[in-house]
Amino acid sequence: MIRFDNSYARLPEHFFVRVAPEPVAAPRLLALNAALAAEMGLDARALAAPEGVAMLAGNHIPEGAEPIAQAYAGHQFGGFVPRLGDGRAVLLGEVVGPDGAHWDIQLKGSGRTPFSRGGDGRAWLGPVLREYLVSEAMAALGVPTTRALAAVATGEDVWRDGRMPGAVLTRVAPSHLRVGTFQYFAARQDTEALGTLTAFAIARHYPQAEGPLGLLEAAVAAQARLIAQWMALGFIHGVMNTDNCHVGGITIDYGPCAFMDDFHPGRVFSSIDRGGRYAWGNQPQIAAWNLAQFATCLLPLIDPDRDRAIERATAAVHRFGPLWQEAWAERLGAKIGLGPEGADLGQALLDRMAETGADFTVTFRTLAEGGPLPEGLAAWEADWRAELGRRGIAPEAAQAMMRRTNPAIIPRNHRIEAAIAAAVAGDAGPFERLRRALATPWEVAPEDDDLRAPPAAHEVVHATFCGT
Ligand code: AMP
Ligand code: MG
C-alpha cells in the first residue's frame, strides 16, 4: 500500500480542482525508474504489475490518493495569462518517502481537466520519452529537477501533426509550486491565499527561510545556482515562462529544451521562440525577470508599507546578478580545471568556440581526457597550459576536476529523436540504451562510445517542439 499524505489537497478548495484522470484503452508500461521508486519507498515490482501500470496510466486510483488539477497563472513569452493550471496533468497524490520527504506523483497526459481550454489533455509518446530521458539525465548530472518515475503507452492515438501514439508520463517532484502559482492568487488580490502558499513553499523547500522575504531570497539564490548549472552543461530550457519557473529552484517543464551541440551563446531550439528570448545566454536575465514577478506577488506580505515592501523585494531580486556570477564563475572555472579564478580563461574559450563552432560537450570533455582539442583552439590551449604552470597545478590534477564537471555524455537531440522514432515504430531498444548510458554521464562504457559523438551534418536537429 502506498503511503499518501496529500498536503496540497488540504489547502483551500480554490487552489485546485478535484478531478480524476481519464482512463485509457490499453495501458502498457514503457519504462519504470526502479531506483527512483526505491528512493520514494515504492515497490517497483508492484508498480510494474497490472494494477500498478493501471495506476500509472490513470485507470486505477490507489487508496489514499486524492487527484487534483492545480491552479496557476503565468507570463508566457512576457504576456500574462491569469489562468493556466494543469490542463493535461493531475496530481494523483503526495507520497511520503522513507526519509519523510513528500513526493508529488503527477500523471502528465492524463486527460482533460477544467484547465484544458481547447486542449485534449493528452500527450504523445515523443514528449513523454523526451522528458523521461532529459529529466533523468539532468538528475544524474546532479541538476535539481523534476523526475520521471514511469512512462506508459495508452493504447490510444492522439492528434498532433497527424495520428500519434498516446502516452502518460509519471512526473515526480517535491512540489509543483511555480512562480505562476503565486501569480494566480496575486492577480486575484487574494493575499490570504498568498500567505498560505508562502507557508507551504517554506515548509516544503526552504525550512530555514523566515517569512515571505526569506522565501524570496532563498528562491533567488536557488535559481541563480540552477541557471549557472544549466549553462555549464550547455542546456537551454527553451520555455522559461513564469509557469515553468519552479519556486523550489528545480528544473521543470522539458518541452522544447535542448543540450547544445556546437556552441553559440545565442543558440535557441524552441520552434515557438522566434525572437530568441530564451537563448542559452539570455537565461540569467530571464530568470531574474521571473523572480521579479515572484517578488511582485509577495509585496503585500513583505511589508504593509508598499514603498518599503518594494525596496526590500527589489534588493532581494538584485542579489540574483552577483549570486549567478559567483555560481557561474565557479562552474566555468571548474570546467577548465581551475578554481573560480579561471572563469576569465573559461570565457575566452567560450568566445573562441563560438567563432569556431566547436562542440560544447566534446571540447570540454576532450580537455578533461587530455586529448587533442578541436581545430582553432590551439592558442587558447597554450594559454591554459601556461596558466596551470603559473599556478603550479599538474595537468592530471586539473583533469581529475574536469572529469567531474564535464560530462562524457549528454542527451543529444538527434539521439533523442532517433530513440523516439524507433519507439513509435515499436522498437524500444534505442530509448533503453540511451537511458542506461545517461544514468552514468561522467563515464561512458566502451560500447556506448558512439553516443558521445555530435550529430553528422544530416543528423543535426535545429528545432525542438513543445508537447502540446
Ligand atoms: P506547458 O507547455 O507545459 O508550459 O503548458 C502551458 C499550459 O498549456 C498549461 O496550462 C498546460 O496545462 C496547457 N496544455 C498544454 N498542452 C495541453 C494539452 N494537450 N491539453 C490541455 N492543456 C494543455
Ligand atoms: Mg509547463
Image: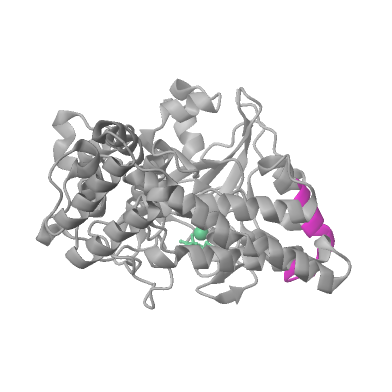
Q: Residue at x 21, y 67 (%)?
A: 355
23 or 263, which is in the foreground? 263
Start and end of the magenta stretch? 186-199
- The total of numbered circles placed on residues is 0
Position above or below: 126 against 132: below
Q: Is residue 20 visible?
A: yes
* Direction front: furthest residue: 390
Query: Residue 242 falls in which quadrant of the image?
Result: bottom right
Residue 70: x and y, percent? 64, 54
Residue 389: x and y, percent? 27, 41
Residue 232 vs residue 77: left or right? left
Residue 91: x and y, percent? 60, 46
Q: Quadrant of the N terminus?
A: top right
Instruction: Indicate whether residue 459 is drawn in magenta.
Output: no
Q: Residue at x 45, y 24 (%)?
A: 44
Q: What's the image's color scheme?
A: one colour
Q: Residue at x 55, y 48 (%)?
A: 21
405 or 381, which is in the foreground? 381
Instruction: Indicate whether residue 197 is drawn in magenta.
Output: yes
Q: Is residue 58 visible?
A: no
Residue 35 vs residue 102: left or right? left
Residue 336: x and y, percent? 31, 45
249 or 431, which is in the foreground? 249
Query: Residue 132 falls in which quadrant of the image?
Result: top left
Query: Residue 404 falls in which quadrant of the image?
Result: top left
Residue 126 vs residue 244: left or right? left
Q: Quadrant of the C terminus?
A: bottom left
Magenta: predominant secondary structure element?
A: helix
